[in-house]
Amino acid sequence: MSKNISKDALNAINKKSGKNITEGAVKKLASTVKPSTLQSEDQLRQLIKQVSAMAKVPVSEDTVRDIVNAVKKSGMNSQSMETLMKMMIKK
């Protein structure tokens, strides 16, 4: 994932969530993500819950399951995380 987080993406996330998530918080969380994180269902679920907590937006188990299935189905890797962010912002 790029070291520079798109300001547009961060602004869209903050607007959508109604929260003020800092670039530093996103970078700190992103630094813990490894390619293996996206391959392990348990690690992926943990990441989803961390993002949910950071944004202070509850995520239902059904939504977690949907995200996990979408990541598995797409064969997504860390290089395409920005695409996932853009997709989720449009929802």
Image: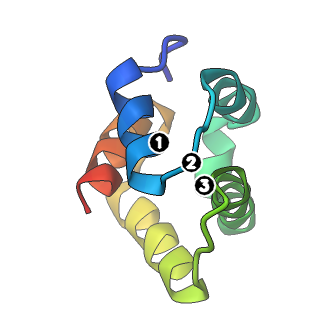
Q: Is residue 35 above or below residue 63?
A: above
Q: Of residues 49 and 79, which is closer to you in this image?
A: 49
Instruction: Find the residue positioned furthest to the left.
Output: 90
User: Which label is found at residue 14?
Assistant: 1
Which mark's residue is nearer the viewer, 1 or 3?
1
Badge 3 local density, few (<14 within 10 Å), some, or many (20+)? Answer: some
Q: Report x, y in % for residue 55.
A: 63, 53
Question: CA gap, disc 2 to disc 1?
Answer: 5 Å
- The residue identified by callout 2 is 19
- Side of 83 relative to 72 (left or right): left
Amino acid bearing label 2: Lys
Mark 2 / mark 3, whichever is N-terminal = 2
Q: Which residue is pictured at 50% across the width and 23% down the height?
A: 1
Q: Quadrant of the C terminus?
A: bottom left
Q: Specify few, some or many for label 2: CA neighbours under 10 Å numbering under 14, 14-19, or 20 or more.
A: some
Which element is circle 1 on? helix
> At 50% from the left edge and 35% from the top edge, which residue is drawn?
78
Outermost residue toward the bottom? 62
